[in-house]
Amino acid sequence: MKKNFLKIRIVLILFALLIFAGSISVSASEGFYFNGGYKLVSNKGAALTCETQNPYITSNGSSSAWAMTCNPPDQNYAQVGWAKDPGFTAPKYFWEYNSVVTSKFGQEYLATAQSGSHNDFMVGSDSTTMYFKINGDVKKTLPLSDLGWTPDAVEFFGETHDTGDQYPGSVSNPVTMGNAQYKTTSGSWVSAGVTEYHNLSTMDNNIDTGDTTWEIWDTRY
């Protein structure tokens, strides 16, 4: 989850969503690869219950799963979840945000996320403050003035940065993502029925349009 990767993530997601139809298959290479669901909707936050696993990653790779509220196609986002990066023996919880409006970026890795555990990830805002929660505990707050953008999409993805990485999940043990929600502009949390997206043929999921619970996996494992 390197900053140079993350600052352009949203542009690439929306570019892929708008330009590519279906999956692609590539040889081993670095890039931005996603598997999960999204919803284009004005919102004040995103929440997801997500299983943690401990996937294999390359020396240049990363494997993660997260909930995000964002303002695509600009590089404006706030997310919370788990990630395994080079040098990690196990995944860690993390939160992160970026704003091209204010040129502010923040990121923190937290405690080790136990493989097999199911955790509640939430990023949301009230009238003045954005908050990042894990299992109901606030891990970070920041003034909305640090962001300066208005969310109009939520995303719930597994992500990798190298085709040599194991994408979250395996055929025999998929990663479960459930209870996907977004916070309405009036302040209520409601179900976020998603649209499926993945951009590698070796990624798979069981998402039907409108689902709020699903599984993702790497077909090679």
Image (cartoon, rainbow, N blue to C red):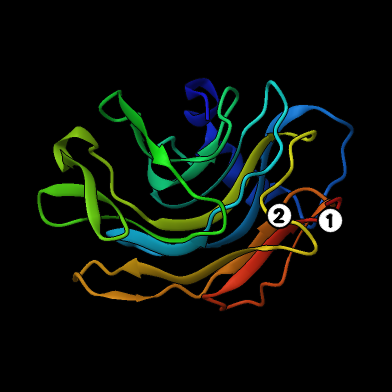
Q: Are marks 2 and 1 in contact (CB under 8 Å)?
A: no
Secondary structure found at label 1? loop
Q: Nearer the viewer, residue 196 or 134?
A: 134
Task: Kindly identify the amino acid type of the residue bearing the numbered disc 2.
Answer: His
| Quarter of the view holding residue 211 | bottom right
- Which residue is under mark 1? 219
| Quarter of the view holding residue 219 | bottom right
* Residue 36 point in image, percent of width and height: 62, 59
Label count reads 2
Task: Kindly identify the amino acid type of the residue bearing the numbered disc 1.
Answer: Thr
Within 10 Å of disc 1 (Cα), the crowding (few <14, some 14-19, many 20+) is: some
- Which residue is under mark 2? 198
Q: Looking at the picture, does residue 178 appear above or below residue 197?
A: below
* Residue 207 point in image, percent of width and height: 66, 72
Q: Nearer the viewer, mark 2 or mark 1?
A: 1
Within 10 Å of disc 2 (Cα), the crowding (few <14, some 14-19, many 20+) is: many
